[in-house]
Structure formats: C-alpha cells, structure tokens
Image (tube, rainbow, N blue to C red):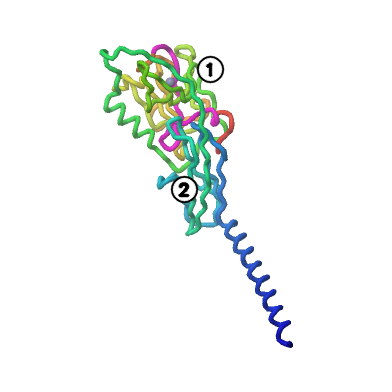
Amino acid sequence: MAVRPLKWWLLIGLTLFSAIAAMMFGVSRADALQVMLKPSTPKLGDTVSVWIASKSQNSPSVEISGQQYPVFAIAPNRWRAFIPTTPLDKPGTRQVIVSADGQQQTLAMPLASRQFPTQSLWIDESGGGLEPTDYEWDTVSAFKKLVTPQKFWQGAFLRPNDGEITTIFGVQRYYNGVFAEDYYHRGVDYAGAYGSPVISPADGYVRLVGTVAQGFRLHGNTVGVDHGQGVLSIFLHLSKIYVKDGDFVKAGQVVGALGSTGASTGPHLHWGLYVNGQAVDPVPWRYESIE
Ligand SMILES: [Zn+2]
C-alpha cells in the first residue's frame, strides 16, 4: 500500500517528461529548418521561390523528382532557390524536398493549370522553316545555362520598351492545324517604333552579343544580360546594339534599338526572361518584385 502512490507519481512524472521532451524536440527541429513556397499556389509560367531558414553552415539542397535546383544564401541562415514553371509542365502536385544537415522537409507544390491563347499558322512546307545556324544555337544555349552566384537585380523589373504588347508570354500554336507540343511563346513582344530604345529591365552583366553577320539568322541581332542567380534576359530582333560582352548595365540603361532582324515579320522587341534555363512569365517579375 505504501509503494502505490510512488508508482503513480513516477508514471505521471515520466509522461510529463516525455511530453515536454517531444515538444522541445519538435520546436528545435522546426527552428532548425523552415521552408516556405511563394507563391504557395503557383500556375503554369510562374517562378516559385523556395525560402529556407536553416542554422546549417552548408547550403541546403532543393529537389523535385531527383532534379536539383541552385540554392543561394540571401542573408545569415537564410537561403532561396527558384523553381521555374512553363506552359509545357503538367499541372498537378509536385513534392519539393529540402534537405540540410540530415534534416529534411517535404512541401507539396500544387501547380495549377492556366489557359494560354493560341495562334493558327498556315505555312508552306516546301519552303523549309528558318533554322538557326550551329554557332547561333550553341551561343544562345550556352547563355541560357548561365547560373552565377551574385544577385544583381533589385526590386521589380522595368518595361524594356515603350511599345504596346502584341504577343504575351505562353501563347501556343497550331501549325497547319496540328498543335505544336513543344512550342510556347518564350517571352513578350513589344511593337515599339523602329529604332526606339531597348533598355535593360534590371542590373546585370552583358553575357551575349550576337549579330546577323555572325550567323544569328533566327534571333537577329541579340543581347543577353545576366541578372545573377540563374535569372537572364534576352532581347531579339534589334536594329542596333550599344553594348559589348562583359559590360555591366544598370536597370534602365539602353542596350540596343528595336528592329526587325532575324525571323521577324515587322519591327518588334522580343524580351525573354529565363530562370534556371527555362523561359518564365515575366509579368510577376515586372509587378511583384521577386527577391
Ligand atoms: Zn516574341
């Protein structure tokens, strides 16, 4: 009889202890690795930011289905990765796996569908399509792969030309009645005046200058700017180029003049915005200030 109360106290004490330990363990884990997606409910074409808080000294890793995404330190114990999405992605939920020092968090990224406008083109197949030269293809491909560690842009991107937008991002096509599976308009077209200024929408280094004379028969006279951390701008069909490879350009600085060089049916600027090699919708970058 004398022993029973002691046993009850032991049991209550042990229960309390384990409950407190579980709470502390849970809190300390959450404190060590926190992950947030922005936007949390993206749609096709959006750039998804993965925000990570981690006490780890080492860079966390971010992956979806085995594919790794570049991660950059943005502040002490703070990291960020970009997941580009495109009209070619299948809507549905992805599992974003973030790992740091043996800890792991999995977040569901529900990628919503989005209707893009379509165009129907009827082309004479006997003429043969305009193909890029090998030099053009290789140079542009190499540029699109650039991922440099520094971040040069600040805040929202500027409009690169004053002309009205004639073709938005993501427009899809039918060629001679057949849906082009791999095609989407990888940028925004501005129908500005011939010779009007084309400005860099954000700070960065010029890492691509291509001319018709060098073989840029599809893109025409082209400038590419590296805004850092896998974010790149490309400007096509220019009539004039005012920068050279390696120049640092400020947001708003004129890089060229609008033209109609390359595969172009009239004066316009094509601005493509690439994130980790994929052409994304520039609209959120223009209006939402992605950091
Ligand atoms: Zn275009």
At x 56% / y 40%, what residue is drawn? 38
Q: Which residue is mark 1?
A: 162
Query: In the image, residue 68 lies at what x, y percent?
Result: 42, 46
| Residue 250 left/right relative to 129 | right
* Kind of residue indicated by mark 2: Val
* Kind of residue indicated by mark 1: Asp
| Residue 149 left/right relative to 157 | left
- Identify the image quadrant of the N terminus: bottom right
Above or below, 12 against 136 in this view is below
Q: In this rendered view, identify the residue nearer to me: 287 or 85.
A: 85
Q: Which residues are magenta?
A: 265-285
Report the disc number at residue 62.
2
Is residue 76 among the parts visible in the rendering? no
- Element on which disc 2 rests: strand
Query: In the image, residue 155 lies at what x, y percent?
Result: 57, 34
- Identify the image quadrant of the C terminus: top right
Above or below, 18 against 264 in this view is below
Q: In this rendered view, identify the residue nearer to me: 202 or 130.
A: 130
| Residue 144 left/right relative to 35 | left
| Sequence-first tag of 1 and 2 | 2
Q: Residue furthest bottom?
A: 2
Q: Quadrant of residue 216?
A: top left
Query: In the image, residue 176 lies at what x, y percent?
Result: 35, 15
Q: In this rendered view, identify the residue nearer to me: 11 or 80.
A: 11
At x 33% / y 20%, what residue is drawn? 218
- Element on which disc 1 rests: loop
| Residue 147 left/right relative to 218 | right
Query: In the image, residue 178 lies at what x, y percent?
Result: 36, 20
Q: Quadrant of residue 284?
A: top right
